[in-house]
Amino acid sequence: MESPPEPLVGQAPTGGIEALCMRILGRYELPDGVIEHSVKVAEVARFIAMRLIKRGEDVNLEQVVAGALLHDVGKSARHMRRGARNHAEASAEIVQAEGLPELTGIVARHILDSIISVDDYPRNWEEKVVFYADKIVTRRLVTVEERFADLHERRADITDLLAASLPPTKALEAEILTAAGLTWADLAARFGGKLAVG
């Protein structure tokens, strides 16, 4: 088994946390599409987090952006999983190994299984915002319904999970948008998505 690389944290950082995260994504040799998705998720997550902060919520913006950038790093074919059952747990292994343990919960709780789990449900704003931003971004902004429809088409093996996780995902969306003082129209105007119908 290949040894994990030396953590980048602490190695003369230049450009801040975002540059560090991009270097981590690069070292794990992720496909361009995964990186493009992660950057867009981070843009949307940053916008929502900033609105939450503006309305007085306690949100760590740096952790939201870093967690969003690294949420799918576990999709790396280069990473040798040490017990991870899915890419979210693999992402948690990687951020831990890279010296960013504060991101572990954020990346571990961004998958649909989390939203229907008592133990793994997103617990704080950082985890909730990254979970939600991931569900409304492909390579562009989409509604939760569009994202679930796309997943349903591509992943017949998770039909039951999709059915179970849609209602709590919509509830989390309502919680976040209400707390942030946002509507879907605000997000669509900012990021060029389509308005939800009905």
Image (tube, rainbow, N blue to C red):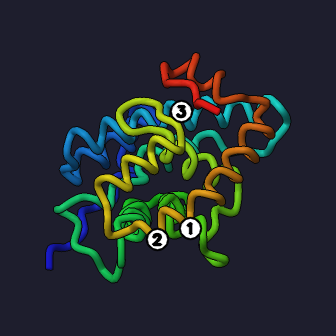
Quadrant showing the C terminus: top right
Cα separation between marks 2 and 1:
6 Å
Position of residue 180 relative to residue 126, above or below, is above
Task: Determine the residue positioned at 71% across, 29% down.
Answer: 183
Quadrant showing the N terminus: bottom left
Task: Determine the residue positioned at 45% across, 38% down.
Answer: 137
Residue 105 % position (x, y):
56, 64
Q: Nearer the viewer, residue 73 or 116?
A: 116
Q: Nearer the viewer, residue 10 or 189?
A: 189
N-terminal of the pair, mark 1 or mark 3, is 3
Task: Determine the residue positioned at 41% across, 65% down.
Answer: 88
**Outermost residue to the front:** 198
**What amino acid does circle 1 point to?**
Ala
The secondary structure type at the circle numbered 3 is: helix
Of tags 1 and 3, the one toward the viewer is 1
Left-right relation of 168 to 111: right
N-terminal of the pair, mark 3 or mark 2, is 3
Position of residue 4 relative to residue 1, above or below, is above
**Outermost residue to the bottom:** 83
According to the picture, the residue beneath numbered tag 3 turns out to be 44
**Outermost residue to the left:** 1
According to the picture, the residue beneath numbered tag 1 turns out to be 164
Position of residue 129 relative to residue 123, above or below, is above
Can the viewer see residue 108? no
Q: Which mark is residue 160?
A: 2
**What amino acid does circle 2 point to?**
Asp
**What amino acid does circle 3 point to?**
Val
Of tags 3 and 2, the one toward the viewer is 2
